[in-house]
Amino acid sequence: MYKEKIQNNTLFREARIEDLDILVSLHTKLLMMEGDFIYDKVAINNGMKMLLANVNSFILVLETKGEIIGMCTLQFVVSTVEGGMVAVVEDVIIDEKYRRRGLGKKFFRYIEDFCKLKNIRRIQLLTQYENKNSIMFYKSLGLNALERIFFFKKL
């Protein structure tokens, strides 16, 4: 398990099954902000359990003073373009009362380092066009926006 402890009792680490309730709670806050998907606690709980059990997926958390205040999910998939594994980053959230303190940048650096240790060749993520704060944040971290349209169909 890859850990990095930084200043002021802040810890970045992989999530554990005992973190499930807080992960579901944070994910719920994210869904309420985005509004694209219907909230289904059972589905979210099941999805989180599947991520925690899958060798090609991870949930990373940001913890301060023993409290989980942020999370993201990573799923490693094969990219034919890269000729190797890439990380799909989703469900990125830091609790609102802890934003604008530089923790998001530190958390994303941890995500990058975690992926580098796993020999991941690219990080990719989606955000909404309307979410100007996220767009500015990701650009400030050196991520490049592509002109793509994301399609999906619920089955």
Image (tube, rainbow, N blue to C red):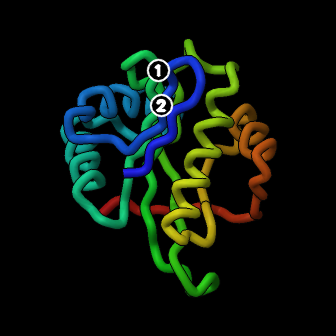
- Regarding residue 151, the answer to whether it shows in the image is no
Q: Which residue is drawn at 30% across and 32% down?
A: 24
Circle 1 is placed at which residue position?
A: 64
Which is nearer the eye, 9 or 137?
A: 9
Q: Which residue sits at x=80%, y=42%?
A: 140
Q: Along the horizontal axis of the image, is 48 left or right of 115?
A: left
Residue at 57 percent across and 30 percent down: it is 6
Residue type indicated by callout 1: Thr
Quadrant for residue 41, please give it: top left
Label 2: how many Cα within 10 Å (few below 14, some 14–19, many 20+): some
- Secondary structure category for the residue under label 1: strand
Tell me if residue 80 can be seen: yes
Q: How many marks?
A: 2
Other-residue count near label 1 (Cα within 10 Å), few / some / many at <14 / 14–19 / ≥20: some
Query: From the image, which quarter does the C terminus lie in?
Result: bottom left
In percent of width and height, residue 43 lies at 23, 44
- Label 2: which residue? 11
Expressed as whole percent of the image width and height from the top left, the position of residue 44 reads 28, 41
Mark with earlier residue (2, 1):
2
- Residue 149 percent across, percent down from the top left: 65, 62
Check residue 14 in the rendering and tell me which mark sits there, or answer none: none
Q: Do the residues labelled 2 and 1 touch (CB within 8 Å)?
A: yes
Residue 58 percent location from the top left of the image: 38, 53
Residue furthest to the top? 97
The Cα–Cα distance between marks 2 and 1, rounded to whole angstroms, is: 6 Å
Quadrant in the rendering for residue 15: top left
| Nearer to the camera, 132 or 79 | 79
